[in-house]
Image (cartoon, rainbow, N blue to C red):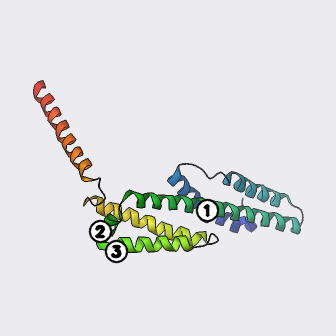
Amino acid sequence: MLNPQLKPLYDRYCSELKPLIAEYESRNENFVTPLLHDIPSMFDNIALYERASTAEEKEEYMMDAEKCLDSAIENLRVCLVASMMEDVNQFKSRFSREILDALDDGRFCGKFFRLEKEVRAIKNTDLQAAYRKLKEMKNMIAECHAGTLATGLLSDNKVTTVFKWLFTIAVALIINLLIFKLL
C-alpha cells in the first residue's frame, strides 16, 4: 500500500511524466535515455524514504525523489520540444510558401508562422509554453493535412501525379487482360 506522504509525488509521476513518456515514445519510437537514470533514482529515493528512521532523513529522501522527478520531466520536455520542432521544420521544407499561403483561405500560414516565431522567442526555461505552442502547430498541421489532402493542395507535383495516374491505368488494363484470358 502506498504511503500517504508519497501520494502527491506518485500523482505527479502518473499525471505529468507518464503522459509525456507515452507521447515521446509514440512520436519517436524510442525511449529518452536520461530517464533511465532519473526514474530509477526517484524510486531509489522513495525506497530510502520508506526505510529512513528520522523525519530529517525522510524529508531529504522525499526532496531527492522530487528532484529526480523534476529532472525527468524537464529532460523529457527538452526532447519533446526538439522532436516537435524537427517535425515542424520538416513540414515547412516539404511545401512551398505559396502552397502554405493557399491553405485554409490564407489563414493557416499567418497563424503557423506567428506560432513558430513565438516558439523560437521562448526561453529554454519555459519549455512547457514551447511545448503547448508546438502542440498547437502540430494540431494545425494535422487538420491541414486532413482537409487539404482531399482537395489536392498538398499533393505531389503535377508530373508525379500524372505518372501515378498513368501507372494506375496501366495496371488496371493488365489486370483486365489477365482476367479476360482466364475466362
Helix, strand or loop under label 3? helix
Residue drawn at point x = 17 percent, y = 37 percent: 170
Image quarter where the N terminus lies is bottom right
> What amino acid type is highlighted by mark number 2?
Ala
The mark that comes first in sequence, 1 or 3, is 1
Q: Residues within 10 Å of mark 1 (few under 14, many from 20)?
A: some
Measure the C-alpha gap from mark 1 to mark 3: 29 Å
The mark that comes first in sequence, 1 or 2, is 1
Measure the C-alpha gap from mark 1 to mark 2: 33 Å
Q: Quadrant of residue 127?
A: bottom right
> What amino acid type is highlighted by mark number 1?
Val
Residue drawn at point x = 40 percent, y = 63 percent: 141
The correct choice, above or below, for 83 with respect to 60 in the image is above
Q: Quadrant of residue 19?
A: bottom right
Residue nearest the viewer, comparing 24 with 45: 24
Discs 1, 3 touching: Cβ within 8 Å: no
Q: Residues within 10 Å of mark 2 (few under 14, many from 20)?
A: some
Q: Which mark is residue 165?
A: none
The mark that comes first in sequence, 2 or 3, is 2
Residue drawn at point x = 72 percent, y = 53 percent: 37
According to the image, label 1 marks what residue? Answer: 78
The correct choice, above or below, for 79 with respect to 132 in the image is above
Helix, strand or loop under label 2? helix
> What amino acid type is highlighted by mark number 3?
Arg
According to the image, label 2 marks what residue? Answer: 102
Left or right: 49 with respect to 11? Answer: right
Residue nearest the viewer, comparing 113 with 31: 113
Helix, strand or loop under label 1? helix
Q: x and y percent of residue 114 in the render?
A: 45, 74
According to the image, label 3 marks what residue? Answer: 107
